[in-house]
Image: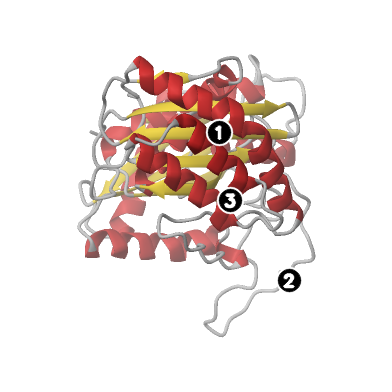
Amino acid sequence: MISNDTIIDRLISICSSKIIRSENIVECCKIIHEKLNFDCVFLAHSTSSEETLSPLACYGKEEVMETCLYRLGVEEKITLTKLPLKAYLDMTGKPVFNKAGSLRIQKPNSGIFMVLNRPKKNYILFGCAHQNSQPYEQKTLEELSSIWKNWQEPLESAVKRLDDHSAPSPVLKTEERLLEPKPEHLAGPVHLRPPENTITESQNDGRRPVVLVDEVTRLYNKAYFTECLGIEVERAKRYSRWMSLVFLSVAPVEGVAVKVDDNLVAIQIAEILSKSLRRVDVICRLDKHKYGIILPDTANNTYGIIAKRIFKYFKQIMGDTPSVFLNISASTYPKHAADHIALLENTEKLLLQAQEVGPNKAVLPE
């Protein structure tokens, strides 16, 4: 077994190279992966614990990394800033990937996480995780603590150099290849930015609309939603997977004296949904007061978790006396519908039921 001192020297040497590339960071993950036999070793980065973490490098099973990043909410990330190390022996309570890469069941995962936190500057998460739940020996925890303590400074310097010499750092796969960046219109919703120059005139020649994002929230719009839903249902059908659709409506609270600013509310809802959902989920603003969320590889047993997260962030962002309330509905292909049209109709019908029940209610079928 290679000594910790040797491992640390190699990590420092790699991160101190004159020319640092993303592949160097993956090589560091590979070294730790091979020493300690985790299913996945990864690094993720953001500017603070409140921001969404972006994968920086990964060696091993990428689906395990995705599970960990999904499960580590804002509270967990803040907690990690106050601890030298946190081990989860049974990370339950949120949807996870199964071995086939599908979000069909809830399955416990385990992992060890450490953070380098520079407030409003750097938040680097170091994670070592397993597909299955298992305990960790004290020796393993001590080894990882020693590695991380000595590796932080050169790693932070390497990450800074990567940021200075490139666009947003690409996610790296186990095979040490760069993921090709997505086309701009598929790169994910970017809200809270003012709209740039956009062309809004409609086209009647059968081609796609020029604009695929909502100008206020920068979420995807109805045109994108309509096309994407059909594609995701076809994908689920082809690969025998689940996929789910969530509708969310926003309505003003009766009797509120202050006039509701629809644009401000829309921006806040976009932030709530962005914090509540995964990076792979497609969030769309369908009209002024309605949102559609496409959840690839998601079964109906995750609805309650998703709804709770949405309502939790709704309270955090909108306060104890919000000027609006929410209603939520959901349906799953193929459990509740045989095609995307039936999926739309069923989810719409359930949304009406939720609205009839009352403010801040959800109708989520089993």
Labels 3 & 2 near each other (Cβ < 8 A): no
Which residue shows up at 67% across the image and 19% down it? 255
Which residue shows up at 75% across the image and 20% down it? 257
Q: Disc 3 designates what residue?
A: 287
- Three-letter amino acid code of the residue under disc 3: Asp
Q: x and y percent of residue 34 in the render?
A: 36, 43
Q: x and y percent of residue 162 in the render?
A: 69, 53
**Mark 1 surroundings within 10 Å by alpha-carbon count, few (fewer than 14), some (14 through 19), many (20 or more):** many
- Three-letter amino acid code of the residue under disc 1: Leu
* Quarter-of-image position of residue 75: top right
Q: Is residue 198 above or below residue 141?
A: below
Which numbered dot is residue 135? Answer: none
Q: Nearer the viewer, residue 358 or 334?
A: 334
Earlier residue among tags 3 and 2: 2
**Mark 3 surroundings within 10 Å by alpha-carbon count, few (fewer than 14), some (14 through 19), many (20 or more):** few
| Label 3 SS | strand
Q: Disc 2 designates what residue?
A: 199
Earlier residue among tags 1 and 3: 1
